[in-house]
Image (cartoon, helix red, strand yellow):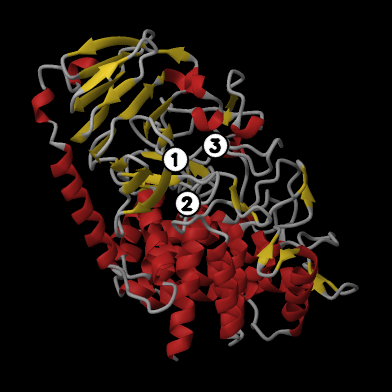
């Protein structure tokens, strides 16, 4: 059964929607980072929604259809049942809702343009309605197959039977359902069958696992659902401004491509055997490389490789559970984050080793050289951390680690490609970087690695030290650090805070990615039962459909932050594969 206050994720790998209790309250059109025409998740009814529900009291069961991103809602009432299949068809900015009902039900469609700031103009059509944006040319058209009537408030009652409600977004209504070219659009039943076949094929191509199978397959489907197929970009999350803390200020727009997050996704897909998808993500990142300067000028990009919209506050929206400000765009675009080159280099190396394909690394050798050159000249500089604290730059230990990873993976790729002339210089510098963070990042008086040079505080990103093989898993310095991270940053067994506080105040909820890192650390230590327990804890704190947000309120067992989040799903895939490999060995 669905947990309270949870959403389910729909996607066609071009755009996405979020749905809860038969109501779609988030739907950016025509792509992930576009304005949303249903934005109730960030406000109230005035922000727009698309609801289908029985007129009578009901109980509801919601589940995905197999491994797809289509959703089956079954509404049970005393007088009969309504079955509703919801999905975003392949290749279209549309929502199709196929019904089979024993009872009459209500369809309530309230699209509002520009995140709820522009009210739509409505006109009736022969078999539906057109909602036009009065300040532009775009529209949402609703086609209905089935017998229906409309009341004075615009609510639609559909009689019992079989049929569908087809909502199509168009940049111009001439291109839509009721325009002269409307005959090109497929029938929802045919679109549904095609979509089911597509998703089943995608998941069937992944490496199989014997443990945590449902969560593993749902995580892969979610990663692919966050991928923008036209370019190979993969976004960090499908939503904007869902609060990390209810009523707090930590509300950000994550519908962009973070180099770090995309690299994690590429790693997970490479290890899962989905090499063509991993390669597409890597090629997208290669397409935005600047070989003349910092290799990745920015931490994040839009799905077409350009700059995201400038960060702004939507003052007219009340926020999710009254959490303001509501932000779209993201000013992290202008930050200097130096760890992302290492994340990319690791992803390229992991892809090359797992796929046995050396062509991509050979074709992109100019990128490898550019990154190595940049890291060689900049590794002594300060940076913003991977957690994107909006404060002064510092010598973060995790960033130094990733500088090391950049040159280590570059050197290893050089050996694979028979370019050993490069390895001596890179190995020498990577050793200097490692010696630097082992000396300056370890605080002797507390016996642990710390957040940044001169700090006395912990940071859970230090769990990555052995995961990137920069330090032996049995090193006493790391084991002491691990013990202190669990003692000081755990809010419950297997659930960790990133750190205690930052520029926005105290951190409250555990960060879901960290549980996957913690599990992978215990897998490397050979403690498989403990790792399995941690993975189970994370899964128990996901939604009923195995979806995860950036954070979780473990007391209420509710998602916090943007949803679904790429980080934990990519991390979970890697943790499960690591577990399987260690179990087999």
| Secondary structure category for the residue under label 1 | loop
Callout 3 touching callout 1 (CB < 8 Å): no
Instruction: Pinpoint residue 517: horizontal percent, then vertical percent.
Output: 59, 69
Instruction: Tell me if residue 432 can be seen.
Output: yes
Instruction: Pinpoint residue 28: horizontal percent, then vertical percent.
Output: 40, 31
Callout 2 touching callout 1 (CB < 8 Å): yes
Left or right, 327 with reference to 153: right
- Mark 3–mark 2 Cα distance, whole angstroms, equals 26 Å
| Secondary structure category for the residue under label 2 | loop
Residue where numbered disc 2 is placed = 2
Left or right, 401 with reference to 438: left
In front of the other: 429 or 585: 585
Q: Residue furthest front?
A: 78
- The image's mark for residue 21 is 1
* Res 471 → quadrant: bottom right
Label 1 neighbour load within 10 Å: few <14, some 14-19, many 20+: many
In front of the other: 243 or 558: 558
* Res 213 → quadrant: bottom left
Residue where numbered disc 3 is placed = 253
* Res 175 → quadrant: top left
- Mark 3–mark 1 Cα distance, whole angstroms, equals 24 Å
In the displayed structure, 298 sits above or below 467; it is above
Instruction: Report the residue at 62% width, 69% height from top.
Output: 464
Counting residues from the start of the chain, the first of labels 3 and 2 encountered is 2
Instruction: Pinpoint residue 193: horizontal percent, then vertical percent.
Output: 16, 49
| Secondary structure category for the residue under label 3 | loop
Label 3 neighbour load within 10 Å: few <14, some 14-19, many 20+: many
Counting residues from the start of the chain, the first of labels 3 and 1 encountered is 1
In the displayed structure, 162 sits above or below 121; it is below
Callout 3 touching callout 2 (CB < 8 Å): no
């Amino acid at each position: 059964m669905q947990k309270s206050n949870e959403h389910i994720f729909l996607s066609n790998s071009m755009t996405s929607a979020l749905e809860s209790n038969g109501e779609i309250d988030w739907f950016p059109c025509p792509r992930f980072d576009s304005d949303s025409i249903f934005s109730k998740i960030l406000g109230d009814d005035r922000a727009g929604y698309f609801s289908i529900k029985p007129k009578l009291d009901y109980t509801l069961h919601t589940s995905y259809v197999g491994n797809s991103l289509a959703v089956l809602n079954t509404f049970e009432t005393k007088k009969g049942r309504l079955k509703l299949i919801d999905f975003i068809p392949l290749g279209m900015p549309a929502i199709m809702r196929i019904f089979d009902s024993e009872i009459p039900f209500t369809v309530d469609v309230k699209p509002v343009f520009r995140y709820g700031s522009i009210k739509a103009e409505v006109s009736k059509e022969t078999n539906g309605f057109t909602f036009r944006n009065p300040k532009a040319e775009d529209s949402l058209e609703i086609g209905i197959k089935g017998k229906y009537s409309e009341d004075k408030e615009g609510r639609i009652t559909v009689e019992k039977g079989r049929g569908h409600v087809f909502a199509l977004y168009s940049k111009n209504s001439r291109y839509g359902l009721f325009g002269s070219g409307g005959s090109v659009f497929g029938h929802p039943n045919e679109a549904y069958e095609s979509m089911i076949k597509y998703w089943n094929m995608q998941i069937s191509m992944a490496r199989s696992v014997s443990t945590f199978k449902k969560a593993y397959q749902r995580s892969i489907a979610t990663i692919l659902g966050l991928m923008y197929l036209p370019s190979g970009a993969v976004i960090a999350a499908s939503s904007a401004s869902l609060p990390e803390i209810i009523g707090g200020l930590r509300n950000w727009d994550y519908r962009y491509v973070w180099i770090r997050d995309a690299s994690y996704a590429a790693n997970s897909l490479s290890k899962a055997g989905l090499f063509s998808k991993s390669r597409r993500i890597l090629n997208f990142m290669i397409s935005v490389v600047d070989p003349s300067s910092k290799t990745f000028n920015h931490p994040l990009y839009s799905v077409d490789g350009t700059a995201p919209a400038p960060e702004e506050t939507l003052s007219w929206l009340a926020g999710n559970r009254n959490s303001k400000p509501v932000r779209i765009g993201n000013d992290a675009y202008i930050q200097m984050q130096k760890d992302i080159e290492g994340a990319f280099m690791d992803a390229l190396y992991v892809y090359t080793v797992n796929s046995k394909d050396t062509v991509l690394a050979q074709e992109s050798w100019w990128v490898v050289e550019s990154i190595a050159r940049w890291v060689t000249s900049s590794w002594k500089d300060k940076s913003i951390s991977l957690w994107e604290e909006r404060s002064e730059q510092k010598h973060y230990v995790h960033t130094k680690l990733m500088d090391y990873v950049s040159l280590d993976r570059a050197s290893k790729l050089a050996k694979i490609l028979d370019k050993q002339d490069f390895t001596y210089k890179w190995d020498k510098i990577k050793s200097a970087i490692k010696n630097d963070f082992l000396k300056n990042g370890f605080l002797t008086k507390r016996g642990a690695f710390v957040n940044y040079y001169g700090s006395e505080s912990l940071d859970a990103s230090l769990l990555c030290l052995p995961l990137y093989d920069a330090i032996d898993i049995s090193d006493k310095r790391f084991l002491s650090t691990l013990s202190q991270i669990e003692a000081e940053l755990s809010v419950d067994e297997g659930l960790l805070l990133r750190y205690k506080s930052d520029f926005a105040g105290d951190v409250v909820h555990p960060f879901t990615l960290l549980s996957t890192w913690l599990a992978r650390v215990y897998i490397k230590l050979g403690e498989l039962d403990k790792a399995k327990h941690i993975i189970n804890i994370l899964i128990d704190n996901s939604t009923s459909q195995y979806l995860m947000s950036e954070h979780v309120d473990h007391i209420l067992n509710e998602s916090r932050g943007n949803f679904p989040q790429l980080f934990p799903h990519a991390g979970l895939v890697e943790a499960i594969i690591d577990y399987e490999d260690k179990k087999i060995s």
